[in-house]
Image: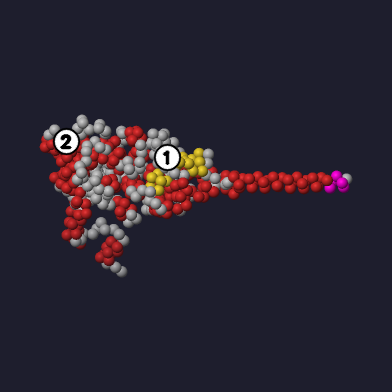
């Protein structure tokens, strides 16, 4: 028979803690937790957030694809020892840009005031609180932003370059800078660049917009004629990486409406298997986007893609960008999944290379195969843009007549001599059949 104390103890053990006296808790712990709850800042990932730290699951696959080698842009890699060599050169570019204005000191003051007005908005673009005071943050926006503006102008010959410029007068300079400036962690908000560009551009320059200068600067990554780039002169982006990505999937062609809002990834056989089923591969147009893959009447049309040492970095950062803040946009992610299905081996790459669909500057077809086979690792695909294409290809692939026709063509019509041999065999078969028929008829006539 238990007393009242035991009954209360049993009640509390059942999970009802409302009757516990506050005096039974550690008051210091309570005060500490309350203080932390009251002081925790709001999440940095809001509607305006667009520049992210790469998730560790992507970084462990290929750390180098997300890490700058030469220049730090923005706060995430600011102050890293290996990147400090470029800091003085940034200042030289800022001085050179301001020197082109009529009143450099006054122009600098205008730029500082403009950055002050944009500070709060710019801070909200980053996925984590920036541990820089107002002075440091504004200096970063100013120096990095003006450096980029002057760099774009120099690269397009809007302004001359000096002989002592390590970016334009060394073999490694420009390629390294281009690569570093497409990293998702190495970005400034586009509105910061637009503001500084508008404040410092002088009438004597070539008249190109910031967007046109940026696209020209990064054109070596996926070369396109300047006439093609002009179609995207009014294209927008949250930062330069986002701008580049938007020119790939905001192509002029009209998108076909999707029957479902979210389409799952669908398996498609590799190139060599599709060839055995009679699927033909055609080099697509170079005028549009490399994403414009189509299938019609047994022909899979794929625009050409240049594969070089910076291609993986570009694709990985575009995918990381889609995975981070633009979950509804899966253009590059879908492309990576589709190409991963088409390319299973170096043989698949070799055939696409012979068709001029892939231009392999890496040298080894196996490297290209490995690149595509790893792009989708740890990536989540919510909406597969090529679901319709895969349905069409798979339906063609599963049709028996297409398989038989392809097999006959491969065995008996792959060369003129094979065709002649096949015709001779058919003629011989007809003659044999005709001879046998006459023998039977002659036998029946004699018997009757």
Overall secondary structure of the magenta section:
helix
At x 12% / y 34%, what residue is drawn? 103
Q: 406 or 439, which lies in front? A: 439
User: In the rendering, at what x and y percent does residue 78 appear?
Assistant: 20, 50
Task: Estimate the x, y position of residue 295 in percent, counting from the top left.
Answer: 48, 40
Percent coordinates x, y for residue 234 in the rendering: 31, 33
Q: Which residues are magenta?
A: 443-447
Q: Which is nearer the eye, 247 or 412?
A: 412
**Front-lying residue, 320 or 353:** 353
Pick the residue in front: 250 or 51. 250
Q: Quadrant of the C terminus?
A: top right
Q: Quadrant of the N terminus?
A: bottom left
Judge from the rendering whether residue 392 lies leftward or rightward of residue 442; answer left or right.
left
Query: Can you identify the residue that label 1 sits on?
Result: 292
Judge whether residue 446 is colored magenta. yes
Q: Residue at x 54, y 48 (%)?
A: 276
* Furthest residue toward top: 203
Mark 2: secondary structure: loop
N-term-proximal mark, 1 vs 2: 2
Numbered circle sitting on residue 103:
none
The reply to whether residue 41 is visible in this rendering is no
Residue extending farthest front = 163
Residue placed under numbered mark 2 in the picture: 100
């Amino acid at each position: 028979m238990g007393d009242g104390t035991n009954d209360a103890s049993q009640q509390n053990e059942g999970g009802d803690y409302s009757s516990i006296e506050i005096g039974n808790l550690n008051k210091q712990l309570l005060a500490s937790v309350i203080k932390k709850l009251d002081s925790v800042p709001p999440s940095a990932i809001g509607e305006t957030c667009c520049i992210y730290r790469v998730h560790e699951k992507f970084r462990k696959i290929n750390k180098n694809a997300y890490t700058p080698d030469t220049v730090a842009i923005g706060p995430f890699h600011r102050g890293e020892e290996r990147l400090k060599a470029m800091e003085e050169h940034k200042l030289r570019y800022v001085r050179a840009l301001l020197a082109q204005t009529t009143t450099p000191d006054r122009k600098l003051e205008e730029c500082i005031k403009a950055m002050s007005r944009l500070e709060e908005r710019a801070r909200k673009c980053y996925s984590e609180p920036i541990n820089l005071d107002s002075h440091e943050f504004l200096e970063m926006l100013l120096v990095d932003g003006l450096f980029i503006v002057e760099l774009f102008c120099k690269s397009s010959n809007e302004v001359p370059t000096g002989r002592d410029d390590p970016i334009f007068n060394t073999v490694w300079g420009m390629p390294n800078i281009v690569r570093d400036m497409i990293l998702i962690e190495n970005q400034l908000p586009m509105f910061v660049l637009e503001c500084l560009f508008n404040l410092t551009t002088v009438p004597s320059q070539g008249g190109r917009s910031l967007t046109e200068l940026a696209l020209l600067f990064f054109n070596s990554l996926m070369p396109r004629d300047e006439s093609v780039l002009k179609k995207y002169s009014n294209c927008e982006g949250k930062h330069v990486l986002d701008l580049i990505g938007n020119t790939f999937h905001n192509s002029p062609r009209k998108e076909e409406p999707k029957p479902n809002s979210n389409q799952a990834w669908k398996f498609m056989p590799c190139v060599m298997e599709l060839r055995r089923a009679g699927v033909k591969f055609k080099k697509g147009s170079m005028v549009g986007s490399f994403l414009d893959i189509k299938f019609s009447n047994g022909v899979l049309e794929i625009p050409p893609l240049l594969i070089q040492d910076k291609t993986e970095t570009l694709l990985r950062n575009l995918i990381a960008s889609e995975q981070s803040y633009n979950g509804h946009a899966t253009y590059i992610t879908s492309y990576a999944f589709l190409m991963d299905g088409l390319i299973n081996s170096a043989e698949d790459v070799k055939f696409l290379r012979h068709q001029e669909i892939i231009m392999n500057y890496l040298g080894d077809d196996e490297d290209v195969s490995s690149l595509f086979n790893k792009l989708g690792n740890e990536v989540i695909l919510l909406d597969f843009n090529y679901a319709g294409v895969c349905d069409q290809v798979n339906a063609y692939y599963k049709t028996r007549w297409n398989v038989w026709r392809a097999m006959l063509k491969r065995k008996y019509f792959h060369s003129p001599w094979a065709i002649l041999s096949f015709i001779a065999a058919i003629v011989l078969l007809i003659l044999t059949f005709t001879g046998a028929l006459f023998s039977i008829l002659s036998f029946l006539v004699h018997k009757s």
